[in-house]
Amino acid sequence: MNSNGKAVLTYEGGKSIDLPIYSGSIGPDVIDIRALGQTGMFTYDPGFLATASCQSAITYIDGDAGLLYYRGYPIEQLAEHADFMEVCYLLLNGELPNKSQRASFESNIRRHTMVHDQLTNFFKGFRRDAHPMAVMVGVVGALSAFYHDALNITNAEHRAISATRLLAKVPTIAAMCYRYNTGLPFMYPRNDLSYAANFLYMMFATPCEEYVPNPVLVKAFDRILTLHADHEQNASTSTVRLAGSSGANPFACIAAGIAALWGPAHCGANEAVLKQLGEMGDVSQVGKYIARAKDKNDSFRLMGFGHRVYKNMDPRAGVMRKTCHDVLNELGLHDDPMFKLALELERIALEDEYFISKKLYPNVDFYSGIVLRALGIPVSMFTAVFALGRTVGWITQWNEMISDPEQKIGRPRQLYVGPAKRDWVPESKRA
């Protein structure tokens, strides 16, 4: 990194310290505060909302402008023209693949879709009604007990092997979580199918009859994976990087990311959308809830509208909106009460001056929840599907961190507000 000037920090006693300023290829400049520790002071930034914890060449977000780029490519272009496997190659390697590179990459993934047969015994230790994410955290973390032949994280070839294994096996494990949950037999992967089609096959096929993937539904699911593949330094990605900074193996790091993703503040939005739609009941109730959303004295808010990162239109929402309507048309679900309710909310949000002025546009979670329900994926599996799409982003971020010569074990500081030093008091003299 080359310095682009300096910021001068002046503190008590008239002392000052120069802090270099760095510029990225796009986006805001950053002030390098590492020298601040020499003063005995640290910055205070709860949630790290104003702190860059690393330099990265993977994903760029501009929330104000509504931009999301993977390796410089706008998400709208990738979702429209690429499939998920091509996006995976791009994220992992930095460039789009040519024909032979893509064929080799996909072939490599297919050869690793099976899981060790003993791994299936893990499922028997869980209750049938266990949440799929609880099972995924345990089973993905356990992969290191079965694939420990390539766990030298300083070896680039070992990292690539582990990345391939995770990309190939997480869909199999996610589908197995659903099948175990519902009492259905596990369906082994079909390597003649695409990545998205294979997952839907493992979810919904039965040994009793042939399963023929619906191309419209497969494309919709593939787009969901693409739109969720990476999202910069969010909570789960930061968790993967922090776990990885200790030298933990990649399977443990991805399991940590899955655990962080499980939190409702991170990945519960599309689930919350459907829950709220269910509470509303039907189209006749829309006016009441719209009025509540506009009432500044009412704490109620519509789920799936606006975004904590994107202060303008969520760049993923437009693609997902088209996909949503394609799926509903294909399945003839426009007359389903819940879908009719969702479409009416969408219409109002896109036309009502209040929502337009507040930039409360439908976001990707609004549409993805509707699509996943239409595909037959239960709400309990929504976060597992998110984890499936995000795995490639986590792996890429982890690999970038391990390869970074400036990488150090994560060690955030704190502002201590507890008692100062005090001496132990015998029990007989305590008040």
Image (cartoon, rainbow, N blue to C red):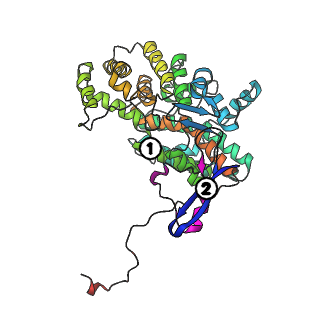
Mark with earlier residue (1, 2): 2
Q: Is residue 246 above or below residue 344?
A: below
Specify start and end residues of the magenta stretch as a single range.
Answer: 29-48
Residue, disc 2:
245
Q: Secondary structure at mark 1?
A: loop
Residue 254 spot, x, y in % from top left = 56, 46
Closest to the observer: 265 or 141?
A: 265
Quadrant position of residue 407: bottom right
Residue 417 spot, x, y in % from top left = 39, 67
Is 71 on the left or on the right of 266, as rendered? right
Q: Residue at x 40, y 45 (%)?
A: 127
Is 231 on the left or on the right of 352, as rendered? right
**Mark 2 burial class by Cα count in 10 Å: few <14, some 14-19, many 20+:** some
Closest to the observer: 245 or 192?
A: 245
Q: Residue at x 57, y 46 (%)?
A: 118
Residue 237 spot, x, y in % from top left = 54, 45
Residue, disc 1:
262
* Amino acid on which disc 2 is placed: Ser
Q: Is residue 227 above or below residue 257?
A: above
**Mark 1 burial class by Cα count in 10 Å: few <14, some 14-19, many 20+:** many
Question: Do callouts 1 and 2 mark residues in contact (Cβ within 8 Å)?
Answer: no
Q: Residue furthest right?
A: 100
* Amino acid on which disc 1 is placed: Trp
Q: Residue at x 35, y 20 (%)?
A: 339
Tell me the tag on residue 96: none
Q: Secondary structure at mark 2?
A: loop
Q: Residue at x 60, y 23 (%)?
A: 77
Residue 169 spot, x, y in % from top left = 59, 38
